[in-house]
Amino acid sequence: MSAHWQSRPEGGGRFALWLIRSIGLYGGRRFGRLFLYPITLYFFLRRKPEREASRQYLEKVLPRPVTTWQVMKHIHCFAATMLDRVFLLAHGERDFQIETEGLELLVERIEQGRGVLLFGSHQGSFEALRALASRQPDVSLRVLLDKQKTPALTELLEALAPGIGDKVIDASKDGATMVLQMAEACAQGAMVALLADRGREHEVLRRAELLGQPAPFPVGPWLLAHTLQVPVVLCFGLYLGGNRYRLIFEPFAERVDIPRHDRAPALDAVIGRYAQRVEHYIHVAPYNWFNFYDFWQQDLHAPVRPEPAVAGERIGN
């Protein structure tokens, strides 16, 4: 259970993802959802570390003892959002009801023309954000994604939406290249989206309280925000069941300042604020949490370093 999340194999592999794609696209979403039940049972039985991580997480957030049914509901929710990625990429919003909160506040920041950083987490569906981007065709959306970690999933997404590869900034590249690409995108007024809750192996981390326990969060996204000096907006795409999603935008900071002489307290403050919002939406939609490893115990084998060195360090994804 203490293994780092990057050491876990990609769930399902190419065949399973091809099967999901084929069932979904040729059988339709209603037919495809019938397969979520055997898929849920398969992963419940075959992926013990993820099953145990789900139970430990649910014990932190639910008021009663966690049942097998609740663990399976958690896995089913994840499987449902994975299947929906097929339809969100292939057909956009056509098959879904996507509610929005705070969209006008995001538009205000886009209109400043400086670019916007969208910080999300592994809760719900980030693909709903891509679908919503079609409402603003004049605004580019770039997404930070580690192609090396999930090659089969990356192939599937690019097959469904051939132009998606051009909109991805590969997080597996060196830090300088990645920061340069993000800076260029912001200079063109684009939205750049990334997930800020997971740290890579050997990445600089700092701990903030989450569900009553200190949890490690990467500092890379916040140092990047300090470097780019553009507005930061939090984004949460919550799955509400059926074909319903709620896409929430919360302005976080007009700019993030991490002074060199007082770096550690400044990072603790900004990461602590982010962790509070993550926890808020955990309580709003507890089955939307898709970190299927012991989030609180990751990287205990390596101490959290007090002072990050550079802004171009690897960024979690």
Image (cartoon, grey):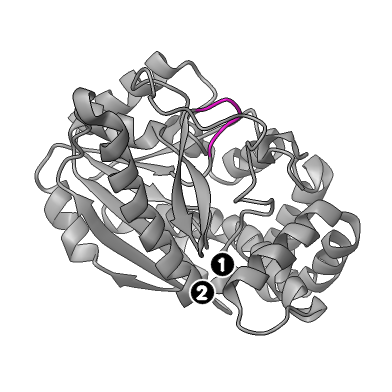
Q: Horizontally, is 155 left or right of 181 in the view?
A: right
Q: Viewer-proximal residue, 109 or 289?
A: 289
Q: Which residues are magenta?
A: 199-203
- Please give the label number shown on residue 285: 2
Residue 249: quarter of image: bottom left
* Label disc, if present, on residue 164 of the rendered structure: none
Task: Determine whether, in the image, residue 172 is placed left or right of residue 40.
Answer: left
Which residue position holds label 1? 288
Relative to 116, 274 lies left or right:
right
Q: Position of residue 220 (x, y in %)?
A: 40, 31
Q: Main secondary structure of the magenta part?
A: loop
Q: Amino acid at mark 1?
A: Asn
Q: 198 or 114, which lies in front?
A: 198
Please report contact status of discs 2 and 1: CB closer than 8 Å, yes or no: yes
The answer to whether residue 184 is above or below residue 193 is: above
Q: Is residue 34 left or right of residue 149?
A: right
Q: Of the residues shown, which amino acid type is indicated by label 2?
A: Ala
